[in-house]
Amino acid sequence: MPSIDVKNAKVLSQIIKAAREGQGVQAQDLADRLGLTPQYISKLESGTSTLFATRLFRVLNRLNIKMTLSYEPKKSDDSHG
């Protein structure tokens, strides 16, 4: 199971995009499943920073909190969970 240290919003964006692509999910399909726009998914994946994400990582870094994500790659399915 891959494990990745997430140090900032840009790294998180790259992980999101890699996971989506690795599962063979199109951005449009992900957006539809989540009730979001494809433009929002694009912004997430491009690292367009949001005020929330920027502040969140500032707080985490200041408090020396390390965020690590673990995931198990899987094939796309029809679940909406």
Image (tube, rainbow, N blue to C red):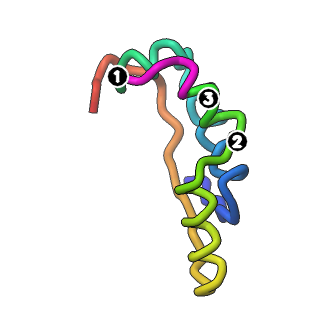
Describe the element under mark 1 as helix, strand or loop: loop
Q: Contact, CB < 8 Å: mark 2 with mark 3?
A: no
Q: Residue at 54% of width from left, 27% of height from top?
A: 40
Give the residue at mark 1.
35
**Quick one: which residue is furthest to the bottom in this view?**
63
Expressed as whole percent of the image width and height from the top left, the position of residue 26 reads 55, 15
Crowdedness near tag 2: few (<14), some (14–19) or many (≥20) residues, C-alpha within 10 Å: some
Residue 22 - label: 3
Image quadrant where residue 60 sits: bottom right
Q: Is tag 3's residue or tag 1's residue first in the polypeptide sequence?
A: 3
**Which residue is drawn at the image coordinates 34% and 22% (left, top)?**
35
Asked whether 41 or 70 is in front, the reply is 41
Which amino acid type is marked by label 2?
Answer: Gly
- What predominant SS class does the magenta segment belong to? helix
Q: Is 73 on the left or on the right of 15, as rendered?
A: left
Q: Is residue 46 left or right of residue 32?
A: right
Task: Where is residue 2? Give x, y as percent.
Answer: 61, 53
Q: Which residue is mark 2?
A: 47
Viewer-proximal residue, 44 or 81?
44
Q: Nearer the viewer, mark 2 or mark 3?
A: 2
> In the rendered structure, which disc, 2 or 3, sits on the residue that comes first in sequence?
3
C-alpha gap between disc 2 and disc 3: 18 Å
Give the residue type that dot 1 points to.
Gly
In this view, 27 is above or below 47: above
